[in-house]
Image (spheres, rainbow, N blue to C red):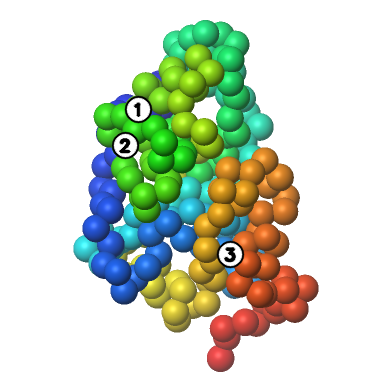
């Protein structure tokens, strides 16, 4: 496998207009996305602006292969095995060979993007070396691939297509390891009972 973290985060911006309010929030898949790639996904929005569109990471789809130890070995990260382990998720359908680390803002390095003052996105090998040595940010998760939307696309999916609910992000949902519960947790945070949802929500 080629090196998945290259020290750059392209096409991202932290200048999202305040009225959008989606940067740092969760997108929670609605029934309209049933039987699609995004069914029951929870996505942390890392960047969102009118000019550049949006980018986010799925935080509730555990990636069983390759495992963290295998990834670190392929990237030449030492020590091996690492002194600290973090969860690895399928981040989205775009650029599966590219890795991102979403983490608490108590660590930053070259190429880090401050998302909202509390959460940071990093795509450099430095953070993996820190984590492998038992150091680095307090909370962290790794994602391979990401989700992306062109300008205006996400707004349309939310407002016209009713594809997503917007929920506040919490450390438990973003960095927690109980992936099976995250979708329901995110819905509960906005007082939505998934048992009452219908696939016809949003349809005329």
- Residue 170 location, x and y as percent? 56, 54
Which disc is residue 29 wearing? 3
Q: Name above or below for residue 1 compared with residue 179.
A: above
Comparing marks 1 and 3, which lies closer to the viewer?
Answer: 1
Residue located 67% across and 41% down the image: 177
Gap in angstroms between the C-alphas marked 1 and 2: 8 Å
- Residue 1 location, x and y as percent? 46, 20
Q: In the current view of this chain or complex, which residue is farthest to the top? A: 79
For the residues labelled 1 and 2, say whether their Cβ atoms are less than 8 Å apart: yes
Which callout, 2 or 3, points at the residue further toward the start of the chain? 3
Q: Give the secondary structure at mark 2.
A: loop
Gap in angstroms between the C-alphas marked 1 and 3: 29 Å
Q: Nearer the viewer, residue 129 or 61?
A: 129
Q: Name above or below for residue 56 compared with residue 2.
A: below
In the picture, measured across the screen, residue 135 lies left or right of residue 187, that is: left
Q: Which residue is mark 1?
A: 124
Q: In the current view of this chain or complex, which residue is farthest to the right? A: 195
Which callout, 1 or 3, points at the residue further toward the start of the chain? 3
Residue located 43% across and 17% down the image: 129
Q: Which residue is mark 2?
A: 112
Residue 186 location, quadrant: bottom right
Q: In the current view of this chain or complex, which residue is farthest to the left? A: 51
Q: Give the secondary structure at mark 1.
A: loop
Gap in angstroms between the C-alphas marked 2 and 3: 27 Å
- Residue 75 location, x and y as percent? 44, 16
Residue located 46% across and 60% down the image: 25
């Amino acid at each position: 496998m080629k090196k998945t973290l290259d020290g750059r985060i392209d096409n991202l911006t932290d200048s999202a207009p305040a009225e959008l309010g989606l940067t740092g929030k969760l997108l929670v898949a609605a029934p309209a996305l049933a039987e699609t790639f995004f069914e029951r996904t929870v996505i942390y929005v890392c960047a969102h602006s009118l000019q550049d569109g949006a980018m986010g990471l799925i935080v509730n789809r555990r990636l069983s292969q390759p495992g963290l130890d295998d990834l670190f070995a392929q990237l030449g990260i030492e020590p091996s095995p690492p002194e600290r382990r973090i969860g690895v998720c399928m981040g989205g359908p775009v650029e599966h060979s590219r890795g991102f680390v979403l983490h608490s803002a108590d660590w930053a390095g070259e190429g880090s993007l401050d998302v909202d003052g509390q959460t940071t996105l990093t795509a450099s090998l430095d953070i993996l070396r820190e984590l492998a040595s038992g150091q680095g940010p307090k909370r962290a998760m790794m994602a391979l691939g990401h989700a992306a939307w062109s300008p205006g696309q996400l707004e349309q999916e939310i407002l016209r297509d009713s594809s997503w609910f917007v929920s506040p992000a919490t450390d438990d949902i973003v960095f927690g390891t109980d992936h099976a519960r995250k979708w329901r947790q995110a819905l509960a945070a906005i007082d939505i009972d998934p048992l009452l949802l219908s696939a016809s929500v949003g349809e005329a």
